[in-house]
Image (cartoon, helix red, strand yellow):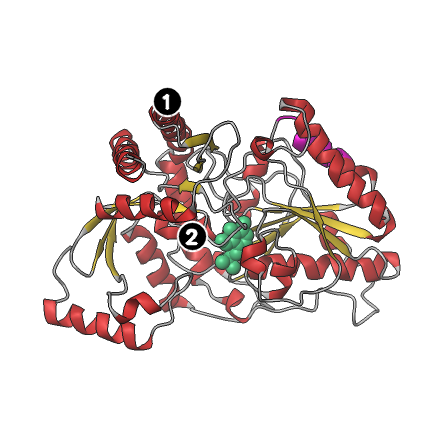
């Protein structure tokens, strides 16, 4: 840390934070006696807190975001230059970085051709839901309005996005939700709903989606919204055979496939987009976190030309377009940062690094599972890994989440920030989460898993 803030300055910041800030995701009672954490600086894979303590960040800013690491001057410079030239104009008009980034992004997404800019993952998903509803009105007399979502998936924090939320603890106390959202079963074989395995399990889990469609009436179902790899619901990598069948089902019943790439998007799994691991052809794709690695707020909803065309087929009808705006979707900082972010990933060969380091992380975690009975299963795709903790490998009973949090706290005390599923699913907040920046080195990965090894040893010693 460069000591830019003197000791008395930083203690004032902590006091101000405690007095005025309503933090995300945490309870505040403990701050009455203890200090809230303030992160002051970041460089590469590391951040420094108010005490000057260094942390190796194994969760890319806490929530899978800072894909290219901290302190990237070239992104800061690109944003600065753009802000001086033009900071903002509403998205009814175009912008130079908006057009350039769209071209670069679409070059990574064959079959898709239109980019709608907004600010957050939740908002991008809301836009997609609105498009599906409008298409239902335009094409199907309002009938094909239902949106299917999956148990354990998450699509955002707004009431519309929570209506498509498959995480019951996250949703609890925020209802009633919007009508027209219907849940389908999850596909996690480790918590199997059917007595099958491998590809047979994957196909069966997808068939369960078809069963829901048939029960609802295919003529009422407009879209299916899925995470390619479920993130906060437990790092769920889909079983083989699942996605092929999902695609078939969508085609069979004329259902739009909306893939939520808010976590997987822009490199997290070692390919540009998570769906590209499975050969899927989506109609709508949403993305946010890694698009500009948190250097500016940006989210994108990307569609096929076919979807786009449905909103411009009758120019004589003044209602016939996507009547939507996102004020800050017109900020130019987002696409300017995103362009430079993408250049960095390409020039530094970070997709390949993600594959290599992801493999190392899964190998290390699997090695730990030989030593620590409490690791029930290790799952992962690229630098997006999870280790589910159980009190008994046979029954798969989850460990008490206080113990999961104790592991996270022990790593934090060692100066390594890891994550865990939290207030997501009743009884199943038991998966440790790892998502280091795509620049991670072998030493970083070993450092993270060594810290986990020590933490598991201490927490489950007795
Ligand atoms: C899969 C997924 N979709 C959507 C969102 C919502 O994104 P945001 O917090 O930017 O609204 C998240 C956030 O964690 C997410 O994990």
Instruction: Point out residue 254 in the picture as x, y percentages from the top left corner.
Output: 81, 44
In this view, 103 is above or below 448: below
* Residue carrying label 2: 292
Residue range in magenta is 240-248
Image quadrant holding the N terminus, namely bottom left
Local packing at callout 2 (Cα closer than 10 Å; few below 14, some 14-19, many 20+) is: many
In the figure, residue 257 lies in which quadrant? top right
Disc number lying in front (1 or 2): 1
Q: What residue sits right under mark 1 in the picture?
A: 370
Residue 45 visible in the displayed image? no
> In terms of depth relative to the viewer, which is nearer, 87 or 52?
52
Q: Quadrant of residue 34?
A: bottom left
Kindly identify which numbered label has been placed on residue 301.
none
Q: Is residue 329 left or right of residue 279?
A: left
Mark 1 crowd level (few <14, some 14–19, many ≥20, 10 Å Cα): few
Q: Identify the residue at image location x=55%, y=42%.
A: 230
């Amino acid at each position: 840390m460069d000591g830019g803030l003197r000791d008395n300055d930083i203690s004032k910041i902590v006091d101000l934070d405690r007095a005025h800030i309503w933090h995300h995701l945490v309870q505040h009672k403990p701050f009455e006696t203890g200090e809230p954490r303030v992160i002051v600086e970041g460089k590469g894979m590391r951040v420094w807190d108010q005490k000057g303590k260094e942390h190796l960040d194994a969760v890319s800013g806490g929530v899978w975001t800072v894909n290219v690491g901290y302190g990237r001057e070239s992104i800061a410079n690109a944003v600065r230059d753009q802000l001086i030239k033009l900071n903002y104009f509403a998205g009814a008009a175009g912008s130079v970085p908006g057009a350039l980034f769209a071209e670069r992004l679409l070059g990574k997404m064959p079959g898709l051709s239109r980019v709608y800019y907004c600010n957050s993952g939740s908002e991008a998903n809301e836009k997609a839901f609105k498009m599906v509803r409008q298409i239902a009105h335009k094409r199907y007399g309002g009938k094909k309005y239902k949106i299917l979502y999956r148990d354990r998936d998450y699509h955002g924090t707004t009431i519309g996005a929570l209506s498509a939320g498959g995480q019951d603890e996250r949703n609890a106390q925020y209802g009633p939700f919007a009508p027209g959202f219907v849940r389908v079963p999850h596909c996690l074989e480790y918590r199997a709903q059917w007595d099958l395995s491998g590809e047979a399990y994957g196909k069966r889990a997808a068939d369960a989606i078809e069963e829901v469609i048939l029960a609802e009436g295919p003529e009422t179902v407009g879209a299916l919204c899925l995470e390619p790899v479920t993130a906060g619901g437990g790092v769920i990598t889909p079983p083989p055979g699942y996605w092929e069948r999902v695609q078939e089902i969508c085609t069979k019943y004329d259902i739009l496939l909306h893939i939520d790439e808010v976590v997987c998007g822009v490199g997290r799994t070692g390919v540009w987009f998570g769906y590209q691991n499975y050969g899927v052809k989506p109609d709508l794709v949403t993305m946010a976190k890694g698009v500009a690695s948190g250097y500016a707020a940006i989210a994108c909803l990307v569609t096929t030309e076919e979807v786009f065309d449905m909103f411009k087929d009758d120019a004589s009808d003044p209602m016939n377009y996507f009547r939507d705006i996102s004020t800050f979707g017109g900020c130019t900082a987002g696409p300017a940062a995103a362009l430079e972010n993408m250049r960095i990933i390409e020039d530094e060969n970070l997709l390949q690094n993600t594959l290599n380091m992801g493999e190392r992380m899964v190998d290390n975690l699997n090695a730990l599972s030989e030593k620590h009975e409490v690791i029930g299963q290790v799952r992962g795709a690229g630098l997006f890994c999870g280790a589910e903790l159980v009190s008994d490998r046979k029954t798969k009973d989850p460990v008490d989440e206080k113990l999961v949090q104790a592991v996270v706290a022990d790593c934090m005390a060692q100066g390594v920030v890891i994550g865990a599923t939290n207030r997501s699913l009743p009884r199943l907040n038991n998966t440790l989460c790892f998502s280091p920046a795509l620049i991670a080195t072998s030493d970083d990965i070993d450092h993270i898993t060594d810290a986990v090894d020590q933490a598991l040893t201490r927490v489950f010693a007795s």
